[in-house]
Amino acid sequence: MATFPHLNFVQKVIGKPRLHGGGETHPRSAYNKSNRKKHSNFLSEKTSLIQQRWGDMLSTRKEQKLAPIDHNVVPVFLKINPDIITSDFNLEKFGIEVISEENDGFIIGASSDRLNSLEEKIKGFVQSNHNTAKIAEFWEIIDGDFSSWKPKHILSEEMFSFWPAITDDDVFQLEVGIAFNKPVPKEPDPTKQGGEKRLQDYRKYLVERDELLMERETSFDNFISHYGFRKSTFAHLEDSFSCEVEINGKGLKDLVLNYPFVFDVSEIEEIGSIVDNSEGIGLDDFIILPPDGDSPEIGLIDSGVMENHKYLASAIKPENSISYLKNNSSTVDEVKGGGHGTKVAGAILYPYGISNISDEYQLPCFIRNLRVLNKENKLEHQFPAELMNQIVEDNYDCSVFNLSINSKVPFRKKHMSSWAATIDSLTHNHRVLFLISTGNIHPHFIRHYINEGESYPHYLNKAQCGIANPAQSSFGLVVGSINHSSFEDSNWKSLGEKNEISAFSRVGSGIWEHIKPDVVEYGGGYVCSKNGINSVKENENTSTELLRSTLNGGNAYSKDSVGTSFAIPRVTHIVARLLKLYPNEDINLIKALVVQGARLPNNLFFNPSDIGIKQLGYGVPSIERVTKNSSRRVTYYNTSNIVAEEGRIYSLKIPESLRNQADEFEILIEVTLSYTAEVRRTRQKTKSYLSTWLDWTSSYLDESMNDFTARVIKEIEEEKIETVKGSGNIIPWKIRENKDWGEVKGLNRNNSSTQKDWAIIQSYDLPEELNFSVRGHKSWDKNAEPVPFALVVSIEALSENIDVYESIRIENEIELPINV
């Protein structure tokens, strides 16, 4: 047990505020209600035009030799009042299935009855029929010229750029996303009144849903087989399925323009990791102690491992190793230049290298060797989303996976990719944690940017340097790289100084302005020639110390490899240590503690910037801060579940000894919230992607518990955050819950599922009690499913010799929670 362990944070107030009403009507919707005939005629003209153009298209399909499609299912593009697109607004009542939720209230839908149900409601709207009132919220229906809107909203940016040049005979390797918006309701309790009947209906619905899903898969297969073939199995999510296909240009155009259920089409990305050609150097032996029997086993998704390596062997259980290569059952790391997975495994077990170990060393965890990359360090024609599902299913006893592989290009910014969304779904439903690298920028590109006048680190602002798929994952713990040293001689100079971002490390923000990466670690750096040619390469002085495979010769370790692949395992090492300390805690706490223990380097900690956070996330995690405290730092945590429209309130009493007006020292307050929820890939923006979204807020410095509780409930009821900038009694958080309120402009902590903030205040400004609330907010979930979360709060004196831990621990002896 650590000398200063983390303390359990008891909920002081538990409450469930309820919404009182629907709020104010939007002026545009109010105008539509006041002008029913005009609005009805406007919508009717659009639906008639869509039906006419759909009929014209159907009449020519056979002579054009196009694939068969269901004549009754019509694509439709709507604009709905964006204020009401929640679980309460059900388009199925209008015969429309949501295919994709776009920005600003736009919806790609599919009418299952050629728009007849919608037309009926539009006509009833004129007569003020009660069940047609929602027609006022239909602001626009886009006409039936699908070529004017579908390609832009369905294709990736790259494919859309060459859409006009596609010919019928072109052949494409694509990843396709197909909507299937038939949500699974909550299973009824058979012990309640009428429960048996509801349970029978529920089971019947599940059977019907499975039949409909198979019908849609078959329909899609029949469509694709007319122009090509499906290359992979389907990867399923709650609202969609995805796969890889080969298809000709004629089929691609028909798929995008006329297949009603498609919402995402993109080219298959090349996936792999960096390869180097290091030779390695020698090392004297030391005593290696195997992991304790109760140590966690970390799933290493990589190129395999040299399992009989003398520094790794005692951490490998060969019977658990699996190869996911299609035609190669070997789990050996065959990558030339010392391997890749072997180096990553070594960095998990020996994060600070091995050259300084002189006596004995106990390994912190076991490594499960899960090989997915071939000897060229590339993914072999394996659909990544499908692969992640298979890996988690096969390795159900692993709760943490190290994923040091990415696509070669930045993530696509519209929909969460199938790979990243699958990781998010697996994280929530199987309670596993994926650690994911941000990806690397090739040295050739860095040299090109510098020669074009974009010096380090300014070229990192270019769109091409954004984090790579699947590092945009909402729930993954995403890791970038910083330099562990700086170097200069007569010929070469390091790109960046110590504790500055590595020249190759891809940067955020993540999708929908998520704060990504979450953290950074030391993954080495590049040097650049000083002769004007600007050659960029690795250097022994700026490279991390790593084990290496000796399969192709060479020595046991090297200092010639760099990459985010080798930053991430250092964080995985910290996670393994946490799992040993908290074997029964949820992965949300593990992630929250890592982020809570991270700190931005240099002056960025005191004066953070949006660029600094986009490059470095929340900084470098310290294993000391992550796993324990000190006499001048105390950490409280709580793990729980919450539903939408519910609040949890936590309180910390501050002892008078820390609030003495005669004293003047700085107090650091850090807060991290981490949560997971169900996801829908057909949605965009965090608050639509997640079934329920959470945030946290804090009391003002002069706000009582009663006043804070009342404010929190009011803000949940009205779905409106009222804490504004400029009030002197607000804790000066660095980021805040609005991009314009905090010290760091342009970032909003509420956009992320891991929300950290910190503030530094004078000790004499501390209140008698600090209060915090975690709040659940409605999204698309109708079942009120609980959302798991972890909240971590730390208080630290930045001056020496201040007793914080014991004084706060004693002041906050366990109290019983109060229900309100």
Image (spheres, rainbow, N blue to C red):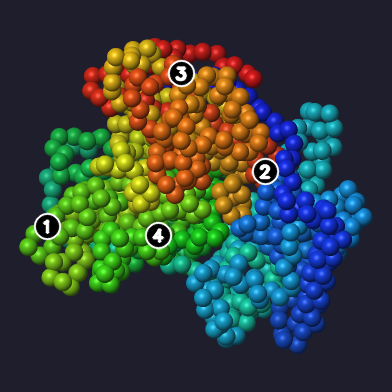
Q: Which amino acid type corresponds to the residue marked 4 in the rendered image?
A: Gly
Give percent across and percent down for residue 360: 18, 34
Q: Is residue 159 toward the left or the right of residue 110 in the image?
A: left
Residue indicated by mark 4: 466
Q: Which of the labelled discs sits on residue 488, or is there none?
A: 1
Q: Which of the labelled discs sits on residue 10, or is there none?
A: none
Q: Secondary structure at mark 3?
A: strand
Residue indicated by mark 3: 769
Residue depicted at 90% across the width and 52% down the height: 128
Which image quarter is the C terminus in? top right
Q: Which amino acid type corresponds to the residue marked 3 in the rendered image?
A: Glu
Residue depicted at 37% across the width and 64% down the height: 462
Q: Which amino acid type corresponds to the residue marked 2 in the rendered image?
A: Asp
Residue depicted at 45% across the width and 47% down the height: 747
N-terminal of the two: label 4 or label 2?
4
Of tags 1 and 2, which is closer to the observer?
Answer: 1
Q: Residues under labels 1 and 4: Cα distance? A: 28 Å
Label 4 CA crowd tier, 10 Å (few <14, some 14–19, many 20+): many
**Within the image, what quadrant is residue 314 found in?**
top left
- CB within 8 Å, label 4 to label 2: no
Q: Secondary structure at mark 2?
A: loop
Toward the viewer: 740 or 734?
740
Extreme-right residue of the structure: 127
N-terminal of the two: label 1 or label 4?
4
Give percent across and percent down for residue 100: 65, 59
Residue indicated by mark 2: 781
N-terminal of the two: label 4 or label 3?
4
Q: Residues under labels 4 and 3: Cα distance? A: 42 Å
Q: Is residue 285 toward the left or the right of residue 699 in the image?
A: left
Q: How many marks can you see?
A: 4
